């Protein structure tokens, strides 16, 4: 009974400060359910889950399911995050520089952006809000363009429709990393009831000149003299990238992409996709169908906040089946590692100096490209927060469809500029009677085959993930797919070049496997690389058996 009384007191205290009638109503309904014998158990479980602890603020900021309580995304949680970030910025001496706030079209994104602006202004900071729902890379660009000390993007990127999130950048235009994340989290923990926070109304709503400046910078990544004959089908997956992508293509001299009508406009319900992530099975099926009907040259798919870019290509009638194992109706989506290699090779050959960078779960091919062109190369932990921090970065990518082709403009992954760069490459190849698949075949010849794959185990019980990781650490497999495990790197201990992270890297005789928990979703993620599709398939099947994934 004492435990129930303590929970009820916490619920009442939360409701006293919650300004949102919808989440207050959610808690009232659960409280009412406690009084009915038929629903009391479920109601108690629902309340206990919502108050089981705060959403963790880390290097990805905040991300979680919309709803009431500290373990959900809502106006109380957002206001506390804004107040903690404001306290951190003031303590660092940034009272005179603006904070830029962007938001996507998910449910409550505009509300969370307004709350952030009010709290920032009330704390004595200058808040500047983007004029409407816009892609994450526009916010990342605006931070440095406007000389801001920080930026906030309200988005859950490619997460399921019921989620939202809060991504934090500092003045260098890249996402927060340690120790800043822990310092901000400490300030958030010190925030009192949000109805006692001072709020202001004097923030600035920015105009379209910021978007125009972003677009002008975006088109600078392509050669104005390069070929432009290319028919592209695009999908925004119900996100905010559709109009910006179209404007970028037109400004760069390409024909306007043919958009998938059912997915072009922002829609927080994401009615045509269960998971609005181009990597998920079925997500770009409508785009592939339209591309086949239009006899297009290329499909471009952005995730809902347009910081990722997926690319699909038509298959030749007599295509190389080693590269088309996941082909569908004559089309195949390129893997992130393939697009990364295509863009990395293009940029490496441009004559510019700098460093090529990718994450430890991405293909090792980029390192070989860097070596051939006499460029620096660096591997980082997963996440663009790490890639963007690489000194002298020339190009960075991660296998999860994230590419940074213009770090001087946007020091983060950018699905708009990546789309322009891959379109330019495809158009130039088309002018020579070649395709992106032909270019990939040439990379195979130059560097040897590098086949990669990735699969995830989605769980309902988050405790299952640390149990699986512990089992792999305590009794690591001796082989995968008939290949002996030569070395196991426990990445939780860190390395000479990497800080500690929860992950395991299995180095095989001719292959590599990395297993780690997802930082943003309830998944255990597995990344594989081998010298052929046959070996890759054998390793994947073996790993799946070890993890109980079939």
Image: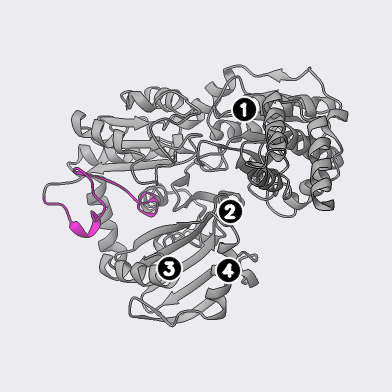
Which of the two discs, 1 and 2, labels the residue nearer the N terminus? Answer: 1
Is residue 332 part of the magenta span, yes or no? yes
Residue 347: % across, % down = 41, 48
Element type at mark 4: helix
Which of the two discs, 4 and 1, labels the residue nearer the N terminus? Answer: 1
Which residue was labeled with disc 3? 548
Which residue was labeled with disc 1? 108
The reply to whether the C-beta atoms of the residues labelled 2 and 4 are less than 8 Å apart is: no
Q: State which quarter of the image contains the C terminus.
A: bottom left
In the foreground, 338 or 71: 71
Q: Find the magenta span and give its range.
A: 318-339
Quick check: 451 above or below 248? Answer: below
Quadrant in which residue 293 is drawn: top left
Q: Is residue 329 left or right of residue 548?
A: left
Instruction: Point out the residue furthest to the front here.
Output: 37
Residue 270: % across, % down = 45, 31
Element type at mark 1: loop
Quadrant in which residue 537 is drawn: bottom left
Q: CA distance from mark 2 to mark 3?
A: 21 Å
Which of the two discs, 3 and 4, labels the residue nearer the N terminus? Answer: 4
Which disc is residue 467 wearing? 4
Q: CA distance from mark 3 to mark 4?
A: 13 Å
Near mark 4 (Cα within 10 A), the count class, few <14, some 14-19 or many ≥20, is: few
Element type at mark 2: loop
Q: CA distance from mark 2 to mark 4?
A: 16 Å
Q: CA distance from mark 1 to mark 2?
A: 22 Å
Residue 310: % across, % down = 38, 42
Q: How is the image coloured?
A: one colour
Q: Is residue 519 left or right of residue 19?
A: left
Q: Nearer the viewer, mark 4 or mark 1?
A: 4
Which of the two discs, 2 and 4, labels the residue nearer the N terminus? Answer: 4
């Amino acid at each position: 009974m004492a435990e129930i009384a303590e929970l009820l007191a916490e619920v009442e205290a939360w409701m006293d400060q919650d300004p949102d009638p919808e989440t207050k109503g959610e808690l009232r309904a659960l409280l009412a359910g406690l009084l009915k014998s038929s629903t009391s158990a479920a109601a108690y479980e629902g309340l206990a889950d919502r108050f089981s602890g705060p959403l963790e603020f880390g290097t990805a900021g905040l991300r979680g399911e919309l709803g009431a309580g500290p373990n959900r995304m809502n106006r109380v949680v957002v206001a506390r995050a804004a107040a903690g970030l404001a306290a951190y910025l003031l303590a660092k001496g940034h009272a005179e520089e603006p904070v830029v706030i962007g938001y996507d079209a998910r449910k409550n994104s505009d509300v969370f952006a307004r709350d952030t602006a009010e709290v920032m202004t009330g704390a004595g900071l200058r808040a500047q809000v983007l004029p409407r729902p816009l892609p994450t890379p526009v916010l990342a660009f605006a931070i440095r363009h406007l000389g801001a000390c920080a930026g906030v993007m309200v988005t859950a990127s490619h997460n399921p429709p019921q989620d939202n999130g809060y991504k934090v950048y500092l003045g260098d235009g890249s996402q927060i990393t340690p120790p800043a994340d822990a310092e901000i989290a400490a300030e958030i923990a010190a925030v009192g009831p949000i109805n006692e926070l001072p709020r202001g109304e004097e923030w600035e709503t920015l105009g379209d000149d910021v978007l125009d400046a972003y677009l002008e910078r975006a088109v600078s990544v392509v050669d104005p003299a390069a070929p432009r004959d290319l028919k592209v089908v695009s999908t925004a997956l119900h996100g905010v990238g559709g109009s910006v992508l179209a404007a970028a293509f037109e400004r760069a001299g390409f024909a306007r992409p043919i958009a998938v009508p059912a997915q072009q406009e922002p829609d927080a319900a994401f009615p045509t996709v269960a998971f609005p992530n181009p990597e998920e099975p079925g997500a770009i099926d409508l785009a592939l169908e339209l591309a086949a009907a239009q006899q297009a040259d290329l499909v471009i798919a952005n995730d809902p906040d347009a910081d990722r870019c997926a690319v699909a290509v038509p298959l030749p009638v007599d295509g190389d089946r080693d590269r088309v194992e996941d082909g569908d109706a004559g089309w195949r989506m390129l893997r992130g590692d393939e697009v990364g290699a295509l863009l990395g090779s293009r940029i490496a050959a441009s004559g510019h100096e700098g460093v090529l960078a990718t994450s430890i779960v991405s293909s090792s091919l980029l390192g070989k490209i860097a070596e051939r062109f006499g460029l620096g190369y660096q591997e980082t932990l997963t996440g663009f927060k790490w890639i963007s921090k690489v000194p002298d970065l020339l190009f960075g990518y991660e296998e999860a469809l994230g590419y940074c082709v213009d770090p001087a403009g946007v020091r983060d992954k950018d699905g708009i500029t990546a789309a322009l760069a891959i379109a330019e490459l495809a158009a130039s190849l088309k002018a020579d009677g070649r395709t992106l698949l032909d270019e990939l075949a040439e990379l195979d010849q130059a560097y040897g085959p590098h086949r990669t794959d990735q699969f995830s185990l989605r769980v309902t019980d988050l405790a299952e993930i640390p149990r699986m990781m512990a089992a792999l650490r305590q009794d690591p497999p001796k082989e995968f797919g008939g290949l002996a495990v030569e070395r196991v790197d426990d990445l939780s201990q860190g390395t000479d070049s990497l800080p500690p992270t929860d992950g395991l890297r299995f180095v095989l005789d001719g292959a590599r496997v990395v297993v780690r928990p997802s930082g943003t979703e309830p998944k255990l993620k597995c990344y594989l690389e081998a010298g052929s599709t046959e070996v890759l398939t054998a390793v994947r099947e073996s790993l799946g058996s070890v993890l109980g994934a079939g």
